[in-house]
Structures are given as C-alpha cells and as structure tokens.
Amino acid sequence: MSSSSTDTYVDVTMPQMGVSVAEGTVVEWKKQVGDWIEADEIIASISTDKIDTDVESPATGRVSEILVDVGDTVDVGTVMARIATDAKPGEAHRSENGVGTGEAAAALEAPGEAGELSGDTEAEHAGTAQKVQRQAGGRRYSPVVMRIAAEHGIDLSQVQGTGRGGRVSKKDVLAFLEQGPAQEPPMHIESPYKPDTPTPPRKPKPRLARPQEPAPAPAAGGQPLSRMRQAIGARMVESLQTAATCTTIAEADMTRIEAARKASGLSYLPYQARATVETLLEFPALNATLENDGTHTVYRDAVHLGIAVSLGEGGLIVPVIRDAQDLSVEGLAKRIKDIARRARSNELAPDEVRGGTFTITNPGGFGSIMATPVINLPQVAILDTEAVVKRPVVVTDEFGNDSIAIRSMTYLCMSWDHRALDGALAAQFLTALRKKLEAWPIN
Amino acid sequence: MPTLTYLQAISDAMREEMRADERVFLMGEDIGVFGGAFKVTDGFIDEFGPKRVMDTPLAESAIIGCAIGASVEGMRPIAEMQFSDFVSCGFDQLVNVAGKTYYRMGLSVNITVRLPSGGGFSGGPFHSQNPEAWFMHAPGLKIVAPSTAEDAKGLLISAVRDPNPVLFMEHKHLYRRVKGEVPGGTYETPFTARIAREGTDLTVITYGAMVHTALEATADLEGSVEVLDLRSLVPLDEEAILRSVRKTSKVVIVDEANQMCAAGAQVAALIAERAWEDLDGPVVRVATPDVPIPFSPPLEQAVLPQVDDVREACRELLEY
C-alpha cells in the first residue's frame, strides 16, 4: 500500500469476526495519528452485533491516518486506519515537522492518499454495482418486482418486459412465475458448499467380495462423504436410534392460502410457518426439547423455528428463526428468504443453527406429497409440508349439502417423539393447524 | 327506495335527524325564510320553526362559536357555511376551540359544519375552493366528503351523531347532478372508504366530485381500474388504501383541491411509507395547480382536473 514513492503504508481493516458478522462499530481508538505502534498491539476496540473485541495492528509503524470515527459503523474489510511502516520509532511524524497539522497535513503530505482512498470506495461501489447489474441485468425494477423476484428467487434478466421501454412490470414477473414453476422453490438449489477436499482415496472395499474380479481402479471407486454429509448421517441415525419416532399425517385444504398467496406473491411456506407458530403456542408440548439425559424443556412463550434448507447435493442445514412468534407472514417470508440465502452462501453463524424448538422441512417443492421426516433432536417434533395439489374433494356447505369441488390440498406430515408425547396430542395439533390454514383470512 | 339528488339527500338527512332528535338544530346565513343559498333548507322553517332553523348574521366565527357553546350545553347543532370558502372567518373557532376543547377540558364538541365546496361552475376564487386540507392539519376535527346521494345522507347523520366536531364537505357541483336511491328514515354511514368500482391493474384514489370524474375517465380504459372513494379524510381509511394498492400496485391520486399538501399528498405519503414493496410504478397525482380558481370558464376547466386529465394519467401509468 504505497501512497508515495517513499512511504509504505499498511491498512488496518475492519476484521471479519466470524462468518455472519458483516459490520463493526469503532468503540475506541487506542492510538492516535502520529503514535508509534507495534505489530499485534491493540489499535482499536470494536463492537459487532455478536461480540466486542480489540483490533490488533497488522504491522509495526506509525499511525498515519484514522479514517473511521468512534461510533461509526463500517462494513467488514473497510480500511479503518493506515500505518506508515517506513517510519522509525522516535522519529517525529511528518505532521509534527511544522508542515501542517492533523488531517490537512496528512492530505498534503500524501497526495496519493486521497486518491487511493477514493479508489477503495470506488472499487467497493463497483462491486455493489456489479452485483446489482448481475442481478438486474442492467435494467431497473420497481419495488414490487424486486420483492417478488427476491421471494421466488427469480433471475429478472430472464423475464420478458412488456412495460414502457421493455420495463418488467409486476404482471410480467407474475406471468413468468406462473409459466415457470421450476423457478418456484428458492430453497432447493445447487449447493454452494464445496465438498471438503477428499482425503487420499481409501482402498475401495466392495461390499460383496468378488475375488474373481480385479479391484476397481481408484478413479472409478467411491469418494468419502463430505464432512457435512457425515455429520447429517450421524445425527439422523442418532435420532432414529434415540427417539421413539412416530409420524402422523393430516390433510389440509389450502385453497384459502392459495388465494392469499396469490395476492401477496409469497410462497406457501411463510403461511404454513405462521400458522404452525400460532398452533405451537397453543400446544407447547410440541414446542419442546428432550435431552438425552431426560431433561424435558417446554417452551410456552417463544417459538424458535428451524427451517430445513436444502443445499442440494451438499446436504441440508437447519437455520433457526428465533422468536418466530413475533413475526408476521411477511416477516417470516423475509427471514426464511434471508436464512436460505445465507445458508447457501455459507454465511450462517453457529448461533443461527442452534437452539431450535421445532422444525419445518419443506420438500414439497420437488413434488412429493408425503414423507416421514426424521426428528431434529433434541426437539420433539418436526413438520413436513408437502406439495399442494388440486384434488376433487367433498365439500359441505352451510346447509349440510355435499358436493365435489376442486380444491388445493396438501398433507401435513409430522414426526414426533413418543417419549415426549402421545399420538392424540399430535393429531390435535395437526387438526388445529389444519383449521388455521383452512380459515385463513383473505382480504 | 326513493331516488334523491345529492342535495335532497342532504336535506333529507337533516330533516329526518331533526325529527328523530330534538337536540338537533340548524344555524346559518339565510337558511330560514330564504331556505339557504342552495335551497338545502327550503321549507325547514315551516316544519321546525325559527328556533331550530336560525338565521344568523354574516359572521362565521360567531356561527361556529355559538354552535360550540350549544353543543357543550348538550345540543347537536348543524352549522352551514354558505360557501366553504367563508369558513376561513371561523377558522379560529374551529381549529383552536372546536378541535381542542375535548383535549383541554374533556368536553365533547358535538357540532357538524356543512361546507358547500368545490368548483366547476365559474364561481371564481371565493366560491370554488376545497379547503378540507386546511383542517386535516388541525388535530381534533373529523372531515368527511361524500360523493353519492346515499353516502351524503348517511355520512351527514353519522356526523351529527359523532361526538366530535365534523366538517361535512358537500360538493356544490354534485348537488343536482348526482342522483341515487336513498334509504328512508335515518341510517349511519361509517367514516371509511368505499370501493366505487373494483379493479385489478390500477387504483384511483379520490373523494367527492372527483370520484365521478375518475369513474368516467377509467370506464373504457384498457386495463381494470379500481376507484377508491375515501369518503372520510379524517379519519383516513389507511387499511382500505393499502389493501387496494397491494392488489393493483399502481396508484393515481386525484384531488380537486390545490395540489400542495392536499388530502392526496397524505395518501401518497402513506403509500410510500407502507406499501413501498408493492409498488410497480410511481405514485401519480392529479390535482389543481397551486393557483386561485379562475372565473373564466375555459380557464377554470384548464386548472380543475378533468376527465381527460385523469384518463391520460391512468393510461400512462397502466402502460408504464
């Protein structure tokens, strides 16, 4: 980082404090401009939404510039200060040589500096612009179009615009959504998690001895499972071996949700999640954990809702929406979208995948209509929401007359731990959930 | 149900309410023997007598002030401003006394002030204004503005029965142009918005005479246009506005009032704040420019929002 031919500078940047931290706030500068600092000496205290910590100097030298004021919050990676590494201890800072003082002097002394700083900013902006560009294909979109696209994971550059000047209107994006249901499930996309670097291939062990055949060449042989797959496997086996897993299935008429969903542009999941959260508050026995040591905890006031996010081949992760009871359908939709996105880009913090009290898994986007999910221990139940399909069903009007109608139906499949509760409660829970979904208010 | 004009519906509301409740009485300039400048109270003095149909001096401050005092004593006065423009002379009584008495002293000011408003008949700058926004800005006053005969009667009865001071904006241009079936007896219309026509592609939000302009302007457009008649400006039916915007994602707001800080400005702000993620285009306003209303008929037509202005704004936004 040289800003002139004679001086060498090292940047002090806002450090990355764990995967989920995107920004930090400067609490205190321990050194001021002109102070000498040793490498690894603390230069500043910062605070993030997770932790408060100190920032160590990356180099030995003299603090030449402080670019972020105390109290300001900046993105991870932002240059907070610069250290002149050519300076010598005891040597006066240039600003002390009577040329000028403070920032003005720094600017005068290092004419390249300002340029460099703006260079950084521009680079950052260019990055953002590129992101937007990539996402938007160089076109501009109205808020509602952006929202629907975000909720459904639509690449707007694929949408044909029929508005003025080819603008993509709400109608266009809804039409696109209608015609391309393959775009629908945003949570099931190819995994961004790369399998761990394979350990040197073990000698393949054919399950059945076939002495006549030569051992297959390693290239054609198996690869070890990724660490994530191994972890999932261990937890699933543990669950099935530990819990007394039963599955109860109820059928729900989703026609009203379908109507609400069409009006709002959201997927089914946030509605199902909201209804589930409300029902859990009525049936706290299902909003509970049962530890191996027999500790049984029932959560009566808060639902920390796990949402299983498929990472495609890579596996599965269950981020937790804490205090889901405080969120509306729209709020849940936003949070689900957010955690799914961050799960896929490996940005979840460890805390965000712990502490769930109930889990929803939602493979229906792939078209399945029924499943028996595996309980996410130590929770005592998991709800599996499946595809919504139109079926002829018997409906009864207010006078008791029956008729056959086409309704949007789905199965609500819930696995629960018979150690913690009994089937009657599971059935009551699902019935209450079904009633909520079937009576959903439509504006 | 009898078919009444907007004006007859207003008369009917007062007549029925006066028959039903002897606390109700009228005050205004020339409303007695003469029957009012627009003949809204024609014949009232014969039925109810001069004590309940009081001719007053040309002093709006006195009219509103007396009404406030009477209401504090338990009466339910209905005060007529001969033209809504003249209410400026009663501004202090309305804004500082009527609007704040409950807040200051816990006394209900149960008055109704009728304000014949609006232009379109070459009335010039003193007889054509839409002053509702002056009072929207003043806490403590309710403001309603019917567009149909049925709502004119129902809203006026609701206004008389409401324990707060209510300004009843009756549009002069609608007096004899708008007719409709009006239920007999007394009934209340809530201070909420009404969907004048359902639609899916764009919402026109307006009130008063402009509801008819909007309906006519959008009747034969390509695209399904919803027309939302606010009916009440204070309280503003925010949920109805947001519901419609969330459905259509495009909004044209029409005010006959001068554009600056008109009722529609508040609606636009609400939408920007609470329906941002549902918008598929700019919030468009059609309103009277910030000029006095001219006498000259062609000039007046040029400043007041016309059917073509609204149609063009809607067409533009539908194509956006």
Image (tube, coloured by chain):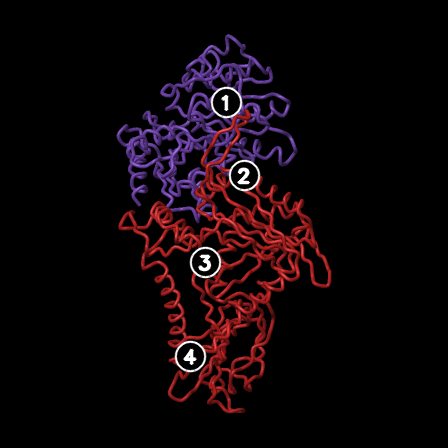
Chain colours: A red, B purple
Name the chain under label 1.
Answer: B
Residue A438's tag is 2
A16 vs A166: above or below: below
Tags 1 and 3 on a common chain: no
Q: Where is residue B108 in the image (x, y as percent from the top left)?
A: 62, 29
Q: Report whether A227 appears left or right of A246.
A: left
Residue type, mark 1 in image: Gly
A273 vs B27: above or below: below
Task: Confirm whether residue B258 shows in the render.
Answer: no
Residue that label 1 marks: B154
**B245 or B306, which is in the foreground?**
B245
Name the chain under label 2.
Answer: A
B29 vs A179: above or below: above
Name the secondary structure under disc 2. Answer: helix
Which of pointers 4 and 3 indicates the residue nearer the eye? 4
Residue that label 4 marks: A217
Residue that label 3 marks: A188
Q: Spatial distance from mark 2 to mark 4, Cα to Cα?
A: 57 Å
Q: Position of residue A352 (x, y in %)?
A: 57, 63
Q: Which residue is drawn at 49% across and 68% down?
A: A75
CB under 8 Å between callouts 2 and 1? no
Q: Which residue is drawn at 64% across and 57% down?
A: A379
Quarter of the picture holding the C terminus of chain B: top left
